[in-house]
Image (cartoon, coloured by chain):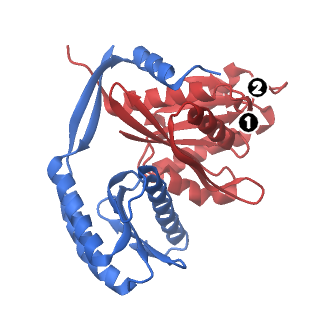
């Protein structure tokens, strides 16, 4: 079973940090296939894509989860569209810095527009919202963030991705949500 | 609430037809890699000579589909006709990415010793074959697991390991 999961969010929200941390944790546990592929600019910003494949055996089903990031910089918007195509599930990485509130919201709106163009409805896709940088002294409170950034009322995770906190939990929840939403049916009695 | 978690795969006839079409093309064109993906970059079938690791082909497929879709975006922006085929030349290899109706892509890596004109000639025939096979594509359930959402999350957490 092949799943494509994309981490999206504003520039510097922590998408790449999530992917890199997750890769190193899962690699230690023998749950990845191959390397982390990274196409970065000279300033170590994501240019096109970062991705790796996680391989998990669940009840005898081989899950191959391809995890990707979109570039956060606005000038690379057309490349985000290419990466979003055919996505199974999304992780919305939200920067908890109150100064990034508007840009977080803008990215959410823009992603909805990209998916609509591709015939998908963002509100119908499996999503996990990750509130990152919870260690900021002036981090926005979760209640306000939930109102602004979680129109799905879906699972959310508080994270400090740079320390690895919340990274695995986010991954578990998005895999669960994708499996339930796209590969499960209510069992007949 | 109990759920049926279902794994689907292509039906056997479709798989065989895809493998045969790609195998014939590999023989004729001497391609190093032929990979058929959906528009999200998920592999349906591939053949490589010499053999590659699955994950390498997965990465190649993702990058090729990304490149093709980026070219589509560019053509939209410039109000050009959307591309049907993308080709670029490397020092030792050429890469071709071809759109296959209704929503698939075919990526081909071919060495410089083979004329690209010849490859494209055989590619036309392959594309027609694939389009006719994919027009009737069927997915069949191959495995079903009964589970509820909470147990699924618990099981995933157990496999993936302790949370940080």
* Badge number at residue A101: 1
Residue A25: quadrant of the picture: top right
Give residue A179's position: percent from left, percent from top.
Answer: 39, 30
Q: Is disc 2 placed on a helix, strand or loop?
A: loop
Please name the residue that numbered disc 2 is placed on: A140
Percent of width and height locating residue B29 = 31, 77
Q: Which chain is blue?
A: B
Where residue A90 appears, as percent x and y from the top left, is 52, 38
Is tag 2's residue or tag 1's residue first in the polypeptide sequence? Answer: 1
**The C terminus of chain A is located in which quarter?**
top left
Badge 2 density bin: few <14, some 14–19, many ≥20, Cα 10 Å: some
- Specify the subunit that label 1 lies on: A
Q: Which quadrant holds the N terminus of chain A?
A: top left
> How many numbered tags mark residues here?
2
Dots 2 and 1 on the same chain = yes
Measure how far apart labels 2 and 1 are at the Cα level.
9 Å
Q: Which chain is red?
A: A
Residue plotted at (33% across, 75% down): B30
B147 lies above or below B105: above
Q: Is residue A113 above or below residue A23?
A: below
Q: Nearest the camera: B28 or B132?
A: B28
Instruction: Decide if residue B109 is in sight here.
Output: yes
């Amino acid at each position: 079973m092949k799943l494509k999961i994309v981490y999206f969010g504003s520039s510097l929200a922590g998408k790449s940090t999530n992917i890199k941390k997750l890769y190193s944790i899962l690699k230690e546990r023998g749950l990845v296939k191959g390397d982390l592929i990274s196409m970065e600019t000279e300033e170590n910003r994501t240019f096109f894509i970062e991705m790796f494949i996680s391989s998990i055996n669940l009840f005898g089903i081989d899950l191959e989860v391809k995890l990707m990031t979109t570039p956060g910089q606005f000038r690379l918007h057309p490349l985000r569209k290419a990466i979003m195509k055919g996505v199974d599930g999304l992780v919305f990485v939200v920067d908890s810095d109150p100064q990034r509130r508007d840009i977080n919201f803008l990215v959410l709106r823009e992603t909805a527009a990209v998916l609509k163009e591709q015939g998908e409805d963002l509100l119908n896709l499996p999503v996990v919202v990750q509130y990152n940088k919870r260690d900021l002294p002036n981090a926005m409170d979760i209640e306000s963030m939930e109102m602004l950034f979680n129109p799905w009322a879906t699972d959310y995770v508080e994270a400090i991705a740079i320390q690895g906190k919340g990274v695995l939990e986010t991954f578990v929840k998005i895999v669960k949500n994708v499996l339930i939403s796209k590969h499960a049916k209510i069992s007949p009695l | 609430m109990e759920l049926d978690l279902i794994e689907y795969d292509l039906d056997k006839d479709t798989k065989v037809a895809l493998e045969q079409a790609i195998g014939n093309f590999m023989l004729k064109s001497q391609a190093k890699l032929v990979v058929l993906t959906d528009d999200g970059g998920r592999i349906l079938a591939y053949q490589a000579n010499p053999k590659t690791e699955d994950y390498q082909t997965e990465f190649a497929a993702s990058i090729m589909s990304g490149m093709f879709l980026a070219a589509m975006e560019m053509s939209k922006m410039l109000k050009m006709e959307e591309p049907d085929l993308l080709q670029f030349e490397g020092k030792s290899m050429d890469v071709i990415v071809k759109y296959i109706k209704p929503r698939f892509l075919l990526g081909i890596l071919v060495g410089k010793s083979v004329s690209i004109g010849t490859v494209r000639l055989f590619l036309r025939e392959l594309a027609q074959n694939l389009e006719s096979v994919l027009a009737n594509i069927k997915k069949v359930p191959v495995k079903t697991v009964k589970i509820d959402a909470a147990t699924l999350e618990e099981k995933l957490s157990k496999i993936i390991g302790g949370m940080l």
